[in-house]
Amino acid sequence: LNDDFQFDMNAHDVMVFLHIQKTGGTSFGKHLVRDLDLKRPCTCQRKKKRCYCFRPHRNENWLFSRYSTGWKCGLHADWTELTGCVDQELDKNEGETAKRRYFYITLLREPIARYLSEFRHVQRGATWKNARHWCLGRHATPDELPPCYNGEC
């Protein structure tokens, strides 16, 4: 059992933000790239939703999130999608294969409040049509997804 949970920005540790929609993740994600007191703060491009969050002495990412890398593993990627995607995306982005330690973080919200918030969000016109469902690094087949409710008894 590895009980070393200390995040080391100077090593090869990467914080991965699993963003569950309607839990406050957009605000939290912005705080991660704008408000932390770091030796090398993230540098954000004006009017773009992208920041560079590099380690103090190397141009390697310590943060994998919407505002640092974009939706590289898909819109609101879940645990399965992230764990099958993050390593190869960072290898591709940094141009090399590295042995990294990943620290996954997320926010939770009281389920009924989260559902109602998402329901109102959809009423205002939001969609997740660009969301994708992945399984083992590829698009999931209909058999791998749970059947959808079709409104018939």
Image (tube, rainbow, N blue to C red):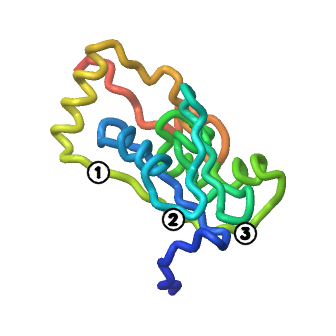
Dot label at residue 37: none
Nearest the viewer among 7 and 104 is 7
Dot label at residue 108: 1
Indicate which disc, 2 or 1, sits on the residue closer to the N terminus: 2
Q: Residue at label 2?
A: 103
Q: Residue at x 72, y 51 (%)?
A: 88
Distance, label 1 to label 3, CA atoms, is: 29 Å
Residue 30 image point, x, y percent: 43, 42
In which image quadrant can residue 141 be found? top right
Q: Residue at x 64, y 49 (%)?
A: 85
Q: Please, what is the three-letter code of the amino acid marked with disc 3? A: Lys
Residue 120 image point, x, y percent: 23, 21
Up-down relation of residue 25 to residue 57 (above or below): above
Up-down relation of residue 129 to residue 63 (above or below): above
Up-down relation of residue 139 to residue 2 (above or below): above
Report helix, strand or loop for mark 2: strand
Distance, label 2 to label 1, CA atoms, is: 16 Å
Report helix, strand or loop for mark 1: loop
Q: Residue at x 48, y 78 (%)?
A: 5
In which image quadrant can residue 111 be found? top left
Up-down relation of residue 56 to residue 3 (above or below): above
Residue 128 image point, x, y percent: 44, 24
Q: Please, what is the three-letter code of the amino acid marked with disc 1? A: Leu
Q: Is residue 73 something one can see in this rendering?
A: no
Which quadrant would the C terminus be assigned to in this image? top left
Q: Residue at x 61, y 51 (%)?
A: 53
Q: Residue at label 3?
A: 99
